Image (tube, helix red, strand yellow):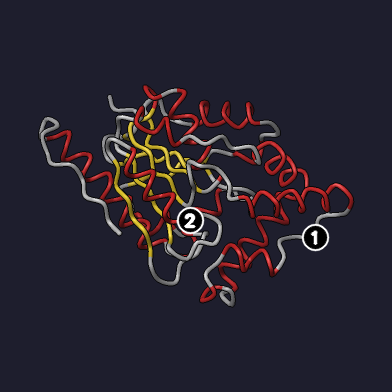
Amino acid sequence: MNNTKLNNTKTRLDCIPGTLCDQRLWSRLAPALGDAFHLRHVPLHQARTRAQMQALIASHSAPQAHLVGFSLGAYLALEHALAHPQRVKSLTLIANSAQGLLPAEVETRQRIVTMLERNAYTGITRQRLRELLHPSHLDDASITGLIQQMGLDLGKDVLLAQFITTIDRPDLMARLPELDFPVLIVGAEDDKLVHPDDLRAMAARLPQATLHLFKDNTGHMIPLEAPQALAGAIRAHLEAMDNFNDNGGHSVPRPLIS
Protein backbone atom coordinates (compact mmCIF):
# COMPACT_ATOMS: atom_id res chain seq x y z
CA MET A 1 0.00 0.00 0.00
CA ASN A 2 1.25 3.47 -0.88
CA ASN A 3 1.71 5.33 2.42
CA THR A 4 1.22 8.68 0.69
CA LYS A 5 -2.35 7.68 -0.31
CA LEU A 6 -5.30 7.73 2.08
CA ASN A 7 -8.00 5.16 1.32
CA ASN A 8 -6.54 4.99 -2.20
CA THR A 9 -8.21 8.30 -3.03
CA LYS A 10 -6.39 11.21 -1.42
CA THR A 11 -2.75 12.12 -1.77
CA ARG A 12 -1.16 13.01 1.56
CA LEU A 13 1.07 16.08 1.69
CA ASP A 14 3.25 16.55 4.78
CA CYS A 15 3.54 20.33 5.19
CA ILE A 16 6.32 22.10 7.09
CA PRO A 17 5.67 25.79 7.84
CA GLY A 18 8.12 28.68 8.08
CA THR A 19 9.23 30.94 10.91
CA LEU A 20 6.41 32.00 13.24
CA CYS A 21 3.89 30.03 11.19
CA ASP A 22 1.66 27.07 11.98
CA GLN A 23 -1.05 25.14 10.14
CA ARG A 24 -2.84 28.41 9.34
CA LEU A 25 -0.16 29.09 6.75
CA TRP A 26 -1.81 26.43 4.56
CA SER A 27 -5.41 27.57 5.18
CA ARG A 28 -5.75 29.05 1.68
CA LEU A 29 -3.82 26.30 -0.09
CA ALA A 30 -5.90 23.39 1.22
CA PRO A 31 -9.21 24.42 -0.42
CA ALA A 32 -7.37 25.46 -3.59
CA LEU A 33 -5.88 21.97 -3.90
CA GLY A 34 -9.29 20.35 -3.62
CA ASP A 35 -10.57 17.06 -2.26
CA ALA A 36 -7.90 14.89 -3.88
CA PHE A 37 -5.32 16.00 -1.31
CA HIS A 38 -5.01 15.70 2.45
CA LEU A 39 -2.63 18.10 4.18
CA ARG A 40 -0.82 16.90 7.30
CA HIS A 41 0.88 19.57 9.38
CA VAL A 42 4.30 19.31 10.98
CA PRO A 43 4.06 21.37 14.24
CA LEU A 44 7.44 23.01 13.87
CA HIS A 45 6.66 25.58 16.54
CA GLN A 46 6.86 22.85 19.20
CA ALA A 47 10.62 22.50 18.68
CA ARG A 48 13.26 24.49 20.51
CA THR A 49 16.38 23.06 18.88
CA ARG A 50 17.45 22.14 15.35
CA ALA A 51 17.51 18.45 16.33
CA GLN A 52 13.95 18.69 17.66
CA MET A 53 12.83 20.29 14.40
CA GLN A 54 14.25 17.39 12.40
CA ALA A 55 12.74 14.88 14.82
CA LEU A 56 9.30 16.46 14.34
CA ILE A 57 9.63 16.22 10.56
CA ALA A 58 10.66 12.57 10.82
CA SER A 59 7.84 11.65 13.20
CA HIS A 60 5.07 13.58 11.42
CA SER A 61 5.82 12.60 7.81
CA ALA A 62 4.93 9.44 5.92
CA PRO A 63 7.49 6.65 5.41
CA GLN A 64 7.63 7.74 1.78
CA ALA A 65 6.45 11.33 1.94
CA HIS A 66 5.37 14.05 -0.41
CA LEU A 67 7.06 16.81 1.61
CA VAL A 68 5.97 20.43 1.14
CA GLY A 69 8.10 23.02 2.93
CA PHE A 70 7.86 26.81 3.09
CA SER A 71 10.81 29.13 3.80
CA LEU A 72 12.51 27.77 6.96
CA GLY A 73 10.36 24.65 6.58
CA ALA A 74 11.66 24.17 3.04
CA TYR A 75 15.27 24.39 4.16
CA LEU A 76 14.59 21.85 6.93
CA ALA A 77 12.75 19.62 4.44
CA LEU A 78 15.81 19.74 2.22
CA GLU A 79 18.03 18.76 5.16
CA HIS A 80 15.66 15.89 5.96
CA ALA A 81 15.65 14.71 2.35
CA LEU A 82 19.45 14.72 2.16
CA ALA A 83 19.68 12.77 5.42
CA HIS A 84 16.84 10.34 4.61
CA PRO A 85 16.36 10.21 0.81
CA GLN A 86 14.67 6.82 1.07
CA ARG A 87 11.84 8.46 3.03
CA VAL A 88 11.01 11.10 0.41
CA LYS A 89 8.88 10.44 -2.66
CA SER A 90 8.73 14.05 -3.80
CA LEU A 91 9.77 17.43 -2.48
CA THR A 92 8.16 20.85 -2.89
CA LEU A 93 10.36 23.74 -1.79
CA ILE A 94 8.60 27.11 -1.52
CA ALA A 95 10.44 30.42 -1.10
CA ASN A 96 13.73 29.00 0.09
CA SER A 97 17.32 28.98 -1.10
CA ALA A 98 19.62 26.01 -0.58
CA GLN A 99 22.36 28.60 -0.15
CA GLY A 100 20.87 29.67 3.17
CA LEU A 101 19.91 33.18 4.24
CA LEU A 102 21.00 36.33 2.43
CA PRO A 103 23.53 38.37 4.46
CA ALA A 104 21.01 41.20 4.87
CA GLU A 105 18.45 38.76 6.28
CA VAL A 106 21.03 37.33 8.71
CA GLU A 107 21.73 40.88 9.95
CA THR A 108 18.00 41.58 10.31
CA ARG A 109 17.47 38.40 12.33
CA GLN A 110 20.46 39.06 14.58
CA ARG A 111 19.13 42.53 15.28
CA ILE A 112 15.67 41.13 16.08
CA VAL A 113 17.18 38.53 18.43
CA THR A 114 19.08 41.24 20.32
CA MET A 115 15.91 43.32 20.66
CA LEU A 116 13.81 40.35 21.74
CA GLU A 117 16.28 39.31 24.41
CA ARG A 118 15.94 42.77 25.97
CA ASN A 119 12.28 43.55 25.36
CA ALA A 120 8.81 42.06 25.19
CA TYR A 121 7.58 40.82 21.84
CA THR A 122 4.78 42.99 20.45
CA GLY A 123 4.17 41.21 17.16
CA ILE A 124 5.18 41.46 13.53
CA THR A 125 5.86 45.05 12.55
CA ARG A 126 4.62 46.88 9.47
CA GLN A 127 8.21 47.05 8.25
CA ARG A 128 8.53 43.28 8.51
CA LEU A 129 5.28 42.86 6.57
CA ARG A 130 6.80 44.97 3.79
CA GLU A 131 9.65 42.49 3.59
CA LEU A 132 7.32 39.48 3.60
CA LEU A 133 4.56 40.62 1.24
CA HIS A 134 4.19 42.08 -2.23
CA PRO A 135 3.02 45.73 -1.99
CA SER A 136 -0.34 44.76 -3.51
CA HIS A 137 -1.13 42.67 -0.41
CA LEU A 138 -0.06 45.05 2.33
CA ASP A 139 -3.60 46.38 2.73
CA ASP A 140 -5.26 42.95 2.57
CA ALA A 141 -6.29 42.41 6.19
CA SER A 142 -7.14 38.76 5.54
CA ILE A 143 -3.44 38.15 4.83
CA THR A 144 -1.72 40.65 7.13
CA GLY A 145 -4.08 39.83 9.99
CA LEU A 146 -3.39 36.12 9.68
CA ILE A 147 0.38 36.64 9.65
CA GLN A 148 0.22 38.95 12.65
CA GLN A 149 -2.10 36.64 14.59
CA MET A 150 0.20 33.65 14.04
CA GLY A 151 3.07 35.76 15.32
CA LEU A 152 1.22 36.83 18.44
CA ASP A 153 -0.12 33.35 19.17
CA LEU A 154 3.25 31.60 18.77
CA GLY A 155 5.11 34.40 20.51
CA LYS A 156 8.54 35.40 21.64
CA ASP A 157 9.90 32.02 22.76
CA VAL A 158 9.08 30.35 19.44
CA LEU A 159 10.52 33.24 17.43
CA LEU A 160 13.75 33.28 19.45
CA ALA A 161 14.18 29.52 19.17
CA GLN A 162 13.56 29.52 15.42
CA PHE A 163 15.81 32.49 14.74
CA ILE A 164 18.71 31.45 16.99
CA THR A 165 18.82 27.78 15.97
CA THR A 166 18.40 28.36 12.22
CA ILE A 167 20.37 31.51 11.40
CA ASP A 168 23.26 29.19 10.53
CA ARG A 169 22.13 27.48 7.32
CA PRO A 170 25.02 25.75 5.53
CA ASP A 171 25.10 25.99 1.75
CA LEU A 172 23.50 22.78 0.45
CA MET A 173 23.87 23.51 -3.28
CA ALA A 174 26.70 21.01 -3.84
CA ARG A 175 24.56 18.19 -2.43
CA LEU A 176 21.48 18.76 -4.57
CA PRO A 177 22.53 16.20 -7.24
CA GLU A 178 22.06 13.52 -4.57
CA LEU A 179 18.27 13.99 -4.68
CA ASP A 180 17.15 11.64 -7.42
CA PHE A 181 13.39 12.16 -7.05
CA PRO A 182 11.01 14.87 -8.31
CA VAL A 183 11.55 18.29 -6.75
CA LEU A 184 9.28 21.27 -7.34
CA ILE A 185 10.88 24.64 -6.62
CA VAL A 186 8.47 27.55 -6.21
CA GLY A 187 9.46 31.17 -5.81
CA ALA A 188 8.58 34.74 -6.74
CA GLU A 189 10.52 37.29 -8.75
CA ASP A 190 9.53 39.95 -6.19
CA ASP A 191 10.50 37.97 -3.07
CA LYS A 192 12.67 40.31 -0.99
CA LEU A 193 14.11 37.46 1.10
CA VAL A 194 15.02 34.84 -1.52
CA HIS A 195 16.73 35.73 -4.79
CA PRO A 196 15.12 33.99 -7.78
CA ASP A 197 18.55 33.36 -9.30
CA ASP A 198 19.25 31.04 -6.35
CA LEU A 199 16.19 29.01 -7.30
CA ARG A 200 17.28 28.80 -10.94
CA ALA A 201 20.68 27.56 -9.79
CA MET A 202 19.01 24.96 -7.57
CA ALA A 203 16.87 23.67 -10.43
CA ALA A 204 19.94 23.33 -12.63
CA ARG A 205 21.64 21.07 -10.08
CA LEU A 206 18.71 18.78 -9.30
CA PRO A 207 18.29 15.63 -11.44
CA GLN A 208 14.46 15.93 -11.53
CA ALA A 209 13.53 19.58 -11.04
CA THR A 210 10.56 21.71 -11.98
CA LEU A 211 10.92 25.44 -11.38
CA HIS A 212 7.91 27.72 -11.05
CA LEU A 213 8.53 31.44 -10.50
CA PHE A 214 5.62 33.82 -9.98
CA LYS A 215 6.12 37.14 -11.74
CA ASP A 216 3.19 39.25 -10.57
CA ASN A 217 1.74 40.35 -7.23
CA THR A 218 3.57 37.79 -5.12
CA GLY A 219 6.21 38.23 -2.44
CA HIS A 220 7.67 35.78 0.07
CA MET A 221 4.40 34.51 1.58
CA ILE A 222 3.40 32.47 -1.45
CA PRO A 223 0.92 30.07 0.27
CA LEU A 224 -1.12 33.09 1.39
CA GLU A 225 -0.52 35.44 -1.54
CA ALA A 226 -0.94 33.00 -4.45
CA PRO A 227 -2.73 29.88 -3.16
CA GLN A 228 -4.53 29.06 -6.41
CA ALA A 229 -1.41 29.31 -8.53
CA LEU A 230 0.62 27.36 -5.95
CA ALA A 231 -2.05 24.64 -5.88
CA GLY A 232 -1.91 24.41 -9.67
CA ALA A 233 1.87 24.03 -9.62
CA ILE A 234 1.71 21.29 -6.96
CA ARG A 235 -1.04 19.41 -8.78
CA ALA A 236 0.87 19.54 -12.08
CA HIS A 237 4.05 18.42 -10.32
CA LEU A 238 2.43 15.36 -8.76
CA GLU A 239 0.38 14.49 -11.85
CA ALA A 240 3.54 14.54 -13.97
CA MET A 241 5.18 12.29 -11.41
CA ASP A 242 2.25 9.84 -11.51
CA ASN A 243 2.32 9.80 -15.32
CA PHE A 244 6.04 9.15 -15.24
CA ASN A 245 5.56 6.18 -12.90
CA ASP A 246 2.57 4.85 -14.86
CA ASN A 247 4.67 4.86 -18.04
CA GLY A 248 7.46 2.89 -16.42
CA GLY A 249 9.72 5.88 -15.99
CA HIS A 250 10.09 6.60 -19.71
CA SER A 251 8.54 10.05 -20.05
CA VAL A 252 10.59 13.05 -21.05
CA PRO A 253 12.04 15.28 -18.27
CA ARG A 254 9.72 17.96 -16.94
CA PRO A 255 10.38 21.43 -18.28
CA LEU A 256 11.43 24.41 -16.23
CA ILE A 257 8.61 26.94 -15.90
CA SER A 258 9.52 30.60 -15.47
137 lies left or right of 108: left
Q: Residue under circle 2?
A: 195
Say which of 110 and 185 sits in front. 110
The three-letter code of the residue at mark 2 reads His
69 lies left or right of 1: right
Q: Residue at x 89, y 50 (%)?
A: 118
Quadrant where the N terminus sits is top left
Measured as percent of width and height from the top left, residue 144 is found at: 61, 68
Is disc 1 placed on a helix, strand or loop? loop
Q: Determine the CA span between mark 2 and mark 1.
A: 29 Å
Q: Residue under circle 1?
A: 122
Q: In the rendering, which numbered label is found on residue 185?
A: none
Quadrant where the C terminus sits is bottom left
Sort mark 2 into few (<14), some (14-19) or many (20+) by Cα contacts within 10 Å: some
Q: Residue at x 62, y 48 (%)?
A: 19
Q: Residue at x 29, y 47 (%)?
A: 210
**As drawn, which residue projects farthest toward the right?**
118
